[in-house]
Image: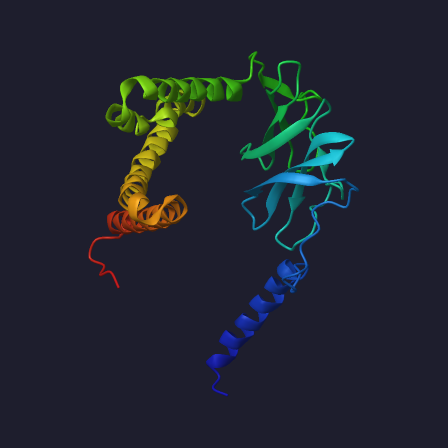
Amino acid sequence: MPRSRVPLLAALALCATLAAPSFAAWPRDPATNVLVSSLSQSGSYSPDVLTDGEGGAFVAWQGLVGSYKTFVQHVTAGGGVAAGWPAGGLQAATGSTQQFPRLASDGAGGVFVAWREDSPDFGNIYLQRVTGSGAIAAGWPAAGVAVCTATGVQDVVRIVAAGALAAAVMLGASVLGPRLSGILIAFPITGSVLPAFTRALYGADATARLIAGFVSGLFAFAVFHFALASALGPLGVAPAYLLAVAAAHGAARVVVRVRRAVWQRRTRPRGTIAR
């Protein structure tokens, strides 16, 4: 073997030897998963995953142990539970029923975990900080910090608002006649309600994305009603609806592909040629 190749092969062998243990604990069988928690739970739901920046991940979920509690676990790049972390996961807080946990990095090797917790007015938001060593951060209360305790249920407000608009359109149909009622069918009930709530809860960027998706969906909406109006007479109710649904589905797929192509064209570096 040429002498010049010996150092290269030795370096590659050393890299393989050093890298192998980092993945040794990960299962090779697709039907076998990494055990995140050994705690006996009646059910585990709503997982959220956040990278730890070192090839591993933090995982949060709601576990049913009498009532739902929020748990956090740290899995290393090697596929095992990080040193210092409980095998069953760390319970993020005491308190009543906790649901829908979400993770965010604290910038210091740990994580923030937020969740919705049941209360007399249903649905307060709490936050807890967990260190990289698997403990509640010093100074943070065991029950977590109450981030939002506003009264009322915002989901119900949205439902009532949308329902009121829909009822107004339906009740007015008998008075306004078929032509004007047909125009009112296209009234954006959800499009009128959701942007206001989205703006208040998630900001302008999320609202813009919501409206963009809504506008894209209007094409399929128009195709559905055009197909239904064209086929209802000759085909009857059931076949016409099936045809309209299929046409709307096809239209939606076309819109998605067009938007994807436009996005890829905008993000493609200059000078490259699309294949």
Q: Is residue 200 visible?
A: no
The residue located at (46%, 80%) in the rendering is 4
In the image, taking residue 105 as reference, residue 236 lies left or right, namely left
Q: Is residue 138 above or below residue 226?
A: above
The residue located at (76%, 42%) in the rendering is 88
The residue located at (43%, 17%) in the rendering is 164
* Quarter holding residue 152: top right
Q: Is residue 221 above or below residue 180?
A: below
Q: Position of residue 242 (x, y in %)?
A: 39, 48
In the image, taking residue 215 as reference, residue 139 lies left or right, namely right
Query: Farthest residue toward the left?
Result: 271
For the residue pair 265 and 131, the one nearer the viewer reads as 265
Total marks shown come to 0
In the image, taking residue 7 as reference, residue 194 lies left or right, namely left
Query: Farthest residue toward the top?
Result: 151
Q: Position of residue 13 (x, y in %)?
A: 57, 72
For the residue pair 69 and 195, the one nearer the viewer reads as 195
For the residue pair 251 and 48, the one nearer the viewer reads as 251
Q: Position of residue 140 (x, y in %)?
A: 66, 22
* Quarter holding residue 210: top left
Q: Position of residue 67 (x, y in %)?
A: 74, 29
